[in-house]
Amino acid sequence: MARTSDARTAGGAAGRASRRRKNPLRFLALYLLLAVAAVQVPLAKLWVLTPWRGGGFGMFSTLDSSSFRPVRVYAVGDGWERRLKLPEDLGGPAYAAGCLPTDGRLEGLARRVAARLRPGKRTVRAVRVEVWKTAFDPATTTLSVRPWRSVRYELDHGAP
Amino acid sequence: MARPETREPWWRRLAASLVEIDSFDLAARLTLVYFMVRPLGPWWAHVPVLLMASCGLLVPWLVRRAGFWFLFALAVASWVIPAWSFIDNHAYLLVYWCLALGCSIAFSDERGETLATNARWMLGLVFALAVLWKVVLSPDFMNGHFFRATLLADQRFRELSLLAGGVTAETYRHNVALLRQLGEGKLGLTAVQLTEPHQQVVFSYVATWWTALVETAVAILFLLRRRLRIAFLRDWMLLFFCWMTYPFASIAGFGWLLTIMGVAQLEPERRAVRLLYLATFGFILIDKLVPWTQGLVALTR
């Protein structure tokens, strides 16, 4: 009887060990890597995410990186507009906006820029944030930029 | 009469000690060194990671606890998840790697072998994805435009441009000044014509094909079955990639992770290759601190 019990115990331990050896969770990190990459590819190809980011390992594969997506900010008034120097502490949000320039993210950046506007002679009606794209012409060795995405954030009563 | 004890030189004893460490333990300790030398995101991720890495180096049995590595994964993920769209890919890889270390202990009886399989597949998949982007999905890599524009405009590759592209310091400064004007966009400037020597054009095409071929080779070799005869080449190819890439590309974090995974998946009997991986880990560390490529540029001018 005791021998049977021992055999059962040994068999159970061996079974547990075998199950443990074959536990699919031991490769959880690999599944996660593949799942994230499977999401990143369509986000970058079909949406506005730069292929350099998002966990798909597309870095150093294309010029469509955040450094080639300059972000520009403008103060807009009645019949005039002026390009603003981006405050240093907004470098991070501007970089994030370049990597994934959704309307929400651009508007968030515009709102933060608006909050930092100093009083001036002219009334600012809106802040516009633009993300530009860079293109390379190999025939003439020319780098050119063009506006790509833009959001205008209206100030409620205008900022003096 | 007793013979005087023959003492081996220190470097030989050091090498002997390094090759005797269990593969799992070595990969785990290197990961802790990585956390110690590399600043990691915001304070809420950096502080716990630094404290845990210190504990792991002082108390070696901690590295064999699954929970320890899950905590690392959690801390790094707390940095990666909110920044998912703009954080570097190696931060993702760091989460996967810590998770692999934890899962190899928690869900397997043979942690070393399971970690080796995780590392091999992870390396293969990372390179396969890099090749997918470069060769298939990207519109401007295989035609050479990426390297041409990058060597002209990306200042991280300044030394490579000066050394291999045949660009003079004056031409480089001129290009940088034009790029600054383009960035400022004064007077509605939307295009600048840069000076590119013929040597740099040729080098860009060579670099394009070279990168595609080497990365494809690494991906295939790591995804091949381990028992195939040519599989041993994977380590040489990965080491070659590291030695060709990291002196010029300022992405040390990625290089360290690749070498740690290389160590983890290596057969224990291949001692010389292990030492080469460790030397590469050290080389990337030194390369980050010592501006030797700038020195090389100064010597060649």
Image (cartoon, grey):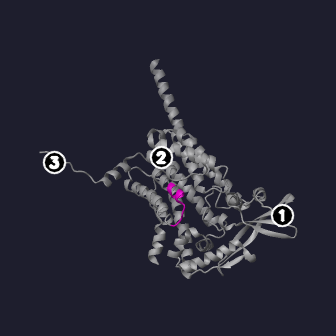
Q: Give the range drawn in magenta.
A: B248-256
Q: Which amino acid does label 2 sit on?
A: Ala
Residue that mark 2 sits on: B28
Q: Mark 1 points at which residue?
A: A124
Q: Nearer the viewer, residue B9 or B275?
A: B9
Q: Mark 3 falls within which chain?
A: B
Same chain for the residues under marks 3 and 2 in the image: yes
Q: Which amino acid does label 3 sit on?
A: Arg
Instruction: Provide the secondary structure element on which disc 3 rests.
Output: loop
Asked if residue A11 can be seen in this view, the reply is yes
Q: Is residue A122 left or right of residue B25?
A: right
In this rendering, the label closer to the viewer, 1 or 3: 1
Q: What residue is shown at x 72% (from left), y 66% (from top)? A: A85
Q: In which quarter of the image is the C terminus of chain A?
A: bottom right
Residue at point 65%, 58% (across, down): A53
Check the image and report above or below for B189 versus B276.
Answer: below
